[in-house]
Structures are given as C-alpha cells and as structure tokens.
Amino acid sequence: MITKCMQCSEEAYEIATDLFSKGEIAAFPTETVYGLGASAYNAAAAGKIFDAKGRPHDNPLIVHVAEKSMIPELVDITETGKALIDAFMPGPITVIMPRKSVIPDEVTAGLDTVGIRMPINAFAHRMLEVCKLPIAAPSANRSGRPSPTTALHVLEDMDGRIPLILDGGPCEVGLESTVVDAANGEPMILRPGAVTKEMIEKVCGVCRVTDSVLRPLRQGEKALSPGMRYRHYAPKGEMHLYEGDANNVAEGICIAYDSALAASLSPCILCFSEHSEMYSSRRFVSLGRLSNPEEAASRLFTVLRDMDRLEIDCIFCEMLPTDGMGLAVMNRLGRAASFQIVKV
Ligand code: TXA
Ligand code: MG
C-alpha cells in the first residue's frame, strides 16, 4: 500500500471522508497527538486500525466527535459526564460513559463503556465536521512506540500500512488526552493529560486519580484502563529516572553517565533547562523549563523518538513535581523508564 501524506485542506478532508465511508482508515492531527481513525460504526474498519498498529484487540478505542450534539447517540450521559463535557469539551479530554449499542464490540473491546473525545484542534474539528461520522481513533503510532506528534512520526511508524496521513503540523499539547472515567459517580483520572486533576476538582468538587499512574502495575493487577497494561513510550535504550535534591541528582546522573561512557555505551541526559549548566560537558537534551511542564509535554515524544534514532543506549533523566501538567509528564516518563527510579 502507498501511504499518501497531504496537508490539511478541504480536498484532503474529502479524501479522508471517502476513505472512512468505504470502511478504510486515515491518520489525522489533533491538539494532543495524531490519531488513526475509522468510522466508529464500522467493526471491520476498527479491525484495520488494530492490524495497522499491531494493537492487542482487548484495548478499546475512543470515539471522536465534531459536535456535542453527536454524543447522546453514542453514550448515556451521566451527571459527572455532563459536567466534564460542559467544562472541557472541545479540548484534550476523553470522558468514559456507558455505551449505546450503535458502537460495535470491536471498538469497545467488549466493554460496556466508551470514551468520547471532542478535539479543539481546528484541522481535527473540520475533518470531523466534513465526514459527519463519529471517528474511532487511537494514537497513530505502532503499538509500544511513543505517540506521534508530527505527521512525520506517523509516517515513520505507518508507511505502507495506511492509505492517508493528514498533515496539520506539530500537535500543540504533545501528550495524549486526559482519560476520565465518568461512567458511575465521581470522576476518576485513568490517564493524566492537559486537563488536570486540579481543573476537574474545580468543576466536580472531587477528582480521584488511579494510583497506578505513578507506578508499574503489580503482577496480576487488573488495569482500570486496558492500555495501561502495555509497555508504552519506551525507547530502546535503558532509561533511569533520578529523584532527589537537584544537586544530588546532577551528581548521580553525571557519575552514571561517565561510567556508561567508560563502558563504551552511548549515554544521554534528559534534564530541565534550569539545571542544564550542571551537565554542560556531557550530552544532554533539555525538556524545557521545570517551571513550565507544558514545554516538557510538547517535546517529550519527539525526544524519546530521537533517542532511538541516535541509538542512545542509556538515558538518565531528571524528574519533576506532579502538580498540574507535571503529573501527565511524570506518568509518561515513568512508563518510558518502566518506573526504574534511582533515589539520591
Ligand atoms: O489524545 C488522545 O486521547 C489521542 C487522540 C488521537 O485523540 N488518542 C489516544 O487513544 O491516545 P489511545 O487509544 O492511544 O489511548 C486511549 C486510552 C487507552 O489507554 C485505552 O485503554 C483507554 O484510553 N480507554 C479507551 N476506552 C476505555 C474505556 N472504555 N475504559 C477504560 N479505558 C479506556
Ligand atoms: Mg496510544
């Protein structure tokens, strides 16, 4: 199969619409990461998404809509769901609610709930508006790779596997949406994102966060969000996070870096710009300012892909506080490092 990559335009949306209506799939930009979409009504088309990604069939897809008026056809809107939709849609949030039977089992992986997302990105919104269909779409990476935040990332993973990539430039947020379970009672964050716990608390009064966000799943533990079971975002090199006072962290990282070099390995340091001076004689990549975790969010997946491209063997990485957007960044860093944390 030849993979076409087209700038977002009215013509490109028509081509995507034609593909979706024929039960085909196409990748498109959103404000979070690129998605790989198919008609949410078409079980066979959903199957093509799983095949192209190499995604386990028990990991459900979320459904994207152009307008709030499309939501009642797809799910039973709960009280918490309504509050989240009113406050945060369109935007980087996925709200899980009880599904209606129009959504096939292949999309929900047999669950009785489905996640609804209404992107705020103008290209995504226009594509969904033109195609007039709810679009089931996971992130457009091969399973296990970091989510794509540019059309080129999608091409790296999907060349020859899908017919079309719509190019809308780099994604503004850079991390996947906040997944919130609103199916029964109080909201619970299953995957942190740019809509933060603090923002949801302001709207709903309370917001729990599943504790496996900052630790690996225990053996035999049931994941609340099936996607959390799988090794994600992981670069090929060994990655370690360093926790402690900034000076101790820098010292620990430099020692580890130097011994990796001495062992003829290819190391790299991921740090925050406030600390980069402490690593100046070594190879480092800045994730942005510690005081602005949105910068790390928007760079992280590109940086992780670069680690593989540069054939880095070991990655030594600083940590950041878990308030606000910091929680989403720490969740992805933790999983990229399989939660291997060195306390100094
Ligand atoms: O920002 C995003 O959410 C992107 C863009 C394309 O919209 N999509 C995305 O989809 O990240 P995906 O499939 O890569 O991640 C969705 C996560 C998965 O971990 C999945 O297991 C979980 O949401 N999920 C989906 N439906 C669920 C459900 N009904 N109950 C619990 N978790 C669910
Ligand atoms: Mg994904």
Image (cartoon, grey):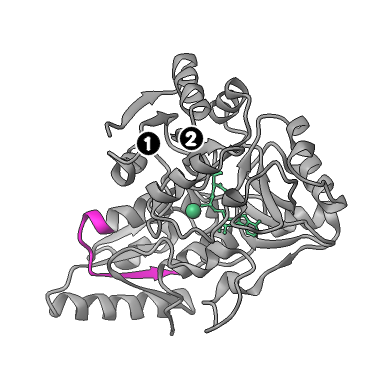
Q: Which residues are magenta?
A: 308-318
Closer to the chain start, of discs 1 and 2, is 2
* Identity of the residue drawn at 38% across and 69% down: 317
Task: Answer with the quarter of the image where residue 91 lies.
Answer: top right
Question: Toward the viewer: 242 or 22?
Answer: 22
Percent position of residue 256, x then y: 28, 79
The circle drawn on residue 29 is 2
Q: Is residue 315 magenta?
A: yes
| Quarter location, residue 135 | top right
Residue 75 x/y as whole percent = 76, 45
Residue under label 1, please give it. Answer: 151
Label 1 close to label 2 by CB (< 8 Å): yes
x and y, in percent, of residue 173 in the image: 53, 44
Local SS, label 2: loop
286 versus 217 height, above or below: above
Residue at left offset 37%, top offset 52%? 142
Is residue 249 within the magenta segment?
A: no
